[in-house]
């Protein structure tokens, strides 16, 4: 099956620092997504990327869809304590054919922000 | 804001027992999913459900698992004879349709923590 490798596994940073995490895949996805999971909660969508090369921002978050369609990165600028959580990348093939929106998740990056 | 709700939030069961995890997806959504997350690991796809039938399932979703949409609002996951390794957080998710196309965003519930002892 498709595998996503996400790195780093964990990060410990000071408030105000920028953060970068990335995901690589063994195969192509048509859509890349980044989710955040808070303790005891389900994943919440942060950013969705639809086209190879696309760079998208959502507030302090910026994500890019790699040209090869096999990778993506997420940057968080000027981190704050509430950025703490687990960040997951996820790949999705487009709807239609044999895909009904199944998400393949990376292993997650645990982010800790020290005030 | 509409949300996916799951019950119970925590279920403890004895090995070999049957469990049913319940989900109420967002009301006008048409695509439904179950995922699981073993403690400290990634979220894994189990099954997708559309038009009253399973549309895709993973190798994890063996004969011990089944899903059902018994009425217009609930979506359930049944594990027939639980094993210790079924202990995990189980997430339900749903998606809507816009202009005849499946929406990108899948909304996840808060999960049911299943502990098999």
Image (cartoon, rainbow, N blue to C red):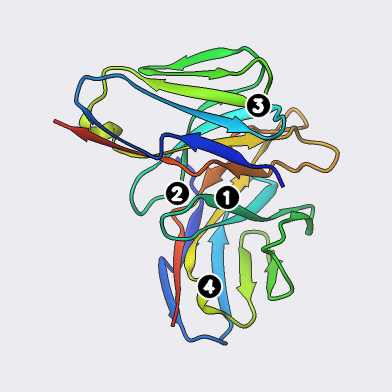
CA neighbours of label 2 inside 10 A, class few (<14), some (14 to 19), many (20+)? many
Seen from the viewer's position, the closer of residues B97 and A42 is A42
Q: Position of residue A65 (x, y in %)?
A: 59, 19
The answer to whether the residue labelled 1 contacts the one labelled 2, judged by CB atoms less than 8 Å apart, is yes
Seen from the viewer's position, the closer of residues A31 and B105 is A31
Location of mark 3 (residue):
A70
Location of mark 4 (residue):
B85
| Callouts 2 and 3 in the same chain | yes
Sequence-wise, the earlier of marks 2 and 3 is: 2
Instruction: Residue lying at the far right in this picture: please name it.
Output: A97
In this view, A57 is above or below B50: above
CA neighbours of label 4 inside 10 A, class few (<14), some (14 to 19), many (20+)? few
Q: Mark 1, chain letter?
A: B
Look at discs 4 and 2 and give the one toward the viewer.
4
Residue name at image x 55 percent, y 61 percent: B23
Quadrant position of residue A37: top left
In this view, A54 is above or below A107: above
CA neighbours of label 1 inside 10 A, class few (<14), some (14 to 19), many (20+)? many
Tag of residue A42: 2
Image check: A11 left or right of A91? left
Look at discs 4 and 1 and give the one toward the viewer.
4
Sequence-wise, the earlier of marks 4 and 1 is: 4
Q: CA distance from mark 2 to mark 3?
A: 25 Å
Q: Secondary structure at mark 2?
A: loop
In this view, B93 is above or below B7: above
The answer to whether the residue labelled 4 contacts the one labelled 3, judged by CB atoms less than 8 Å apart, is no
Q: Mark 4, chain letter?
A: B
Q: CA distance from mark 3 to mark 1?
A: 25 Å
Look at discs 3 and 1 and give the one toward the viewer.
3
Location of mark 1 (residue):
B93
Residue name at image x 40 percent, y 40 percent: A9
Quadrant, the C terminus of chain B: bottom left
């Amino acid at each position: 099956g498709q595998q996503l490798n996400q790195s780093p596994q964990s990060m410990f940073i000071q408030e105000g620092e920028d953060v970068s995490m990335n995901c690589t895949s063994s195969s192509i996805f048509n859509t890349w997504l980044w989710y955040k999971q808070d303790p005891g909660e389900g994943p919440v969508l942060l950013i969705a990327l639809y086209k190879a090369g696309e760079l998208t921002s959502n507030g302090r978050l910026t994500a890019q869809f790699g040209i090869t369609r096999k990778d993506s990165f997420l940057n968080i600028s000027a981190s704050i304590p509430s950025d703490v959580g687990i960040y997951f990348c996820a790949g999705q093939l487009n709807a239609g054919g044999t895909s009904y929106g199944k998400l393949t998740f990376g292993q997650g990056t645990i982010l800790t922000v020290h005030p | 804001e509409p949300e996916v709700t799951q019950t119970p939030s925590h279920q403890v069961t004895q090995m070999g027992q049957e469990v049913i995890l319940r989900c109420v997806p967002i009301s006008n959504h048409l695509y439904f999913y179950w995922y699981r997350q073993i403690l400290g690991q990634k979220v894994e796809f189990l099954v997708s459900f559309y038009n009253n039938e399973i549309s895709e399932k993973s190798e994890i979703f063996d004969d011990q698992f089944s899903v059902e949409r018994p009425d217009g609002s609930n979506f359930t996951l049944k594990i027939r004879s639980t094993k210790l390794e079924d202990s995990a957080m189980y997430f339900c998710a749903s998606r809507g349709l816009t202009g005849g196309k499946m929406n990108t965003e899948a909304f996840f519930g808060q999960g049911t923590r299943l502990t098999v002892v």
